[in-house]
Image (cartoon, rainbow, N blue to C red):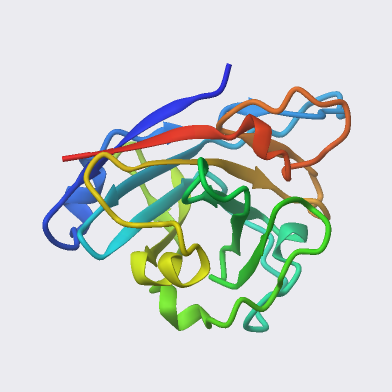
């Protein structure tokens, strides 16, 4: 069964303490495991929205994330320790979705399309549009080490790409959140909403969960 999550409204951008008060969702479906001792890092995602944008923050419990790619826009960050957000802003009107993929350097891979093939890798915007912030070596209240990736998706950007998208109270989007590391010493794949497929493939929009926006 696909997951569902309620996204809270806030009148303005939040500080760190306010972020921590948001109930997280968890990337806890570990997929396509072949190792005798599977690698299962804990990953939390927090979301909220304002009148202008959707905000997301990943907290990933890895003390030494692999971060080879640091070369601007659309590098192959999924080969590093990577977190991803696939978003379908207008699921009832438009089957296309965006894939936002980041490593712990804050490098971004961004694509747009209806499936894995023929994705537009240059939708006309640069990383500066998304307020990307990446931090490593952080400690939680129990002394556990994690890295953090925060960014925002302006609704004006979504409206540019999705003509049928209109920001409103009680919006309903679809999407999925992922953790991977294709070429790391311990390759792994995990998702928020389960993907019951035999072969690794995050580009399965039929398994996207629901994101319910509420005030």
In percent of the image, x 72 and y 43: which residue is there? 202
Query: Which percent across, then down, holds residue 192?
Result: 55, 32
Q: Is residue 85 above or below residue 161?
A: above
> Taking 9 as reference, is 211 left or right?
right
Task: Answer with the quarter of the image where residue 188 lies.
Answer: top right
> Taking 146 as reference, is 30 left or right?
right
In percent of the image, x 64 and y 30: which residue is there? 207
Front position in the image: 75 or 60: 75
Q: Is residue 8 above or below residue 116?
A: above
Quadrant of the image containing the N terminus: top right
Query: Which percent across, then down, holds residue 87?
Result: 53, 50
Quadrant of the image containing the C terminus: top left
Q: Does residue 132 show up?
A: no
Q: Does residue 146 show up?
A: yes
Front position in the image: 93 or 28: 93
In percent of the image, x 39 and y 53: which residue is there? 57
Query: Which percent across, then down, holds residue 211?
Result: 41, 37
In percent of the image, x 59 and y 52: which residue is there? 84
């Amino acid at each position: 069964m696909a997951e569902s999550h309620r996204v809270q409204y806030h009148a303005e951008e939040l500080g760190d303490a306010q972020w921590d008060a948001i109930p997280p969702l968890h990337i806890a479906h570990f997929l396509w495991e072949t190792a005798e001792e599977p690698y299962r890092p804990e990953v939390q995602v927090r979301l909220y929205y304002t009148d202008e944008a959707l905000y997301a923050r990943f907290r990933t419990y890895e003390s030494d994330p692999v971060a080879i790619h640091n070369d601007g826009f659309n590098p192959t960050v999924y080969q590093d320790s990577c977190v991803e957000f696939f978003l379908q802003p207008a699921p009832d009107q438009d089957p296309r979705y965006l894939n936002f993929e980041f490593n712990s350097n804050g490098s971004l891979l961004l694509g747009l399309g209806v499936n894995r093939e023929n994705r537009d890798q240059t939708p006309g915007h640069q990383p500066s549009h998304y307020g990307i912030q990446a931090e490593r070596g952080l400690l939680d209240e129990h002394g556990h080490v994690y890295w953090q990736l925060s960014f925002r998706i302006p609704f004006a950007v979504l409206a540019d790409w999705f003509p049928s998208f209109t920001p409103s109270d009680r919006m309903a989007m679809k999407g999925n959140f992922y953790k991977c590391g294709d070429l790391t010493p311990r390759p792994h794949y995990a998702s928020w909403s389960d993907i019951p497929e035999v072969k690794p493939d995050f580009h399965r929009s039929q398994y996207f969960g629901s994101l319910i926006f509420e005030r």
